[in-house]
Image: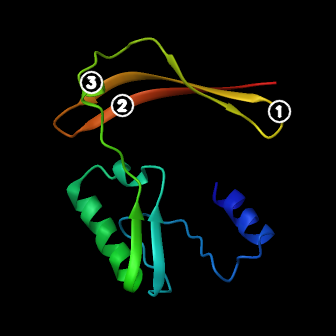
Amino acid sequence: MLDRCRNKVAERGLEERAYLYLDDMARFELPRKDFSLAYIPVRSFMHLNTQAEQLACLERTFAHLRPGGLFIVDVYAPSYVMLAEEPDRPFALRRESCLPNGGTLKRWDRFVRNDPAMQIQHFELHFQEYD
C-alpha cells in the first residue's frame, strides 16, 4: 500500500509536500517535527490494543506536530448489537465494489468472537474478485 501511495504522490508531483514512513505508530521518531497535519486513517488507531499503546501513539504524534497542527483519527463506535452476537455465524455479503478494470470486488465477513473485557471484536473477511 505504501508503494502504491508513493507512486500516486510521484504522479501528482507531491514529493515535496507528502512524507511517507513505515514505522510503529506508538514508537515512531521522524526527522521532522513541524507537520501541520497528521492523519490515522481506516480505523488503524483501534488496532492499538492497550491504553499504553494508544497514549504512546497520541504522544508521539503530538511531538511531531507544529503548534496549532491538526490531528485526525478515523474511528467508529462499535455496534452493541454486534458485541452481543453469537460467534460462528455464516459469512454475509457486506460490500460490492466496481473495479477500474471493469470487474467486481465482493467482501464477505463474519463475526468470530468477542472479548468484552478488552473491547475487541474478531472477524473473518473474505474477498473475491470477479471479471
Q: Nearer the viewer, mark 2 or mark 3?
A: 3
Can you tell which quarter of the image residue 129 is in? Answer: top right
Could you say whether the residue bearing mark 2 is in a helix, strand or loop?
strand
The quarter in which the N terminus is drawn is: bottom right
Q: What type is the residue that disc 2 sits on?
A: His
Name the side, left or right, on which 18 lies relative to 41. right
Q: Name the residue under label 1.
A: 102
Tell me the crowding category of disc 2: few under 14, some 14 to 19, or many 20 or more residues within 10 angstroms, Cα based. Answer: few
C-alpha span from label 3 to label 1: 36 Å
C-alpha span from label 2 to label 3: 14 Å
**Residue 114 vs residue 95, the one in the foreground:** 95
C-alpha span from label 2 to label 1: 32 Å
Where is residue 113 shown, x and y percent of the image?
31, 24
Disc number at residue 75? none
Q: What type is the residue that disc 3 sits on?
A: Val
Name the side, left or right, on which 71 lies relative to 130. left
Q: Name the residue under label 3.
A: 81
Q: Mark 2 points at which residue?
A: 122
Q: Residue at x 74, y 63 (%)?
A: 8
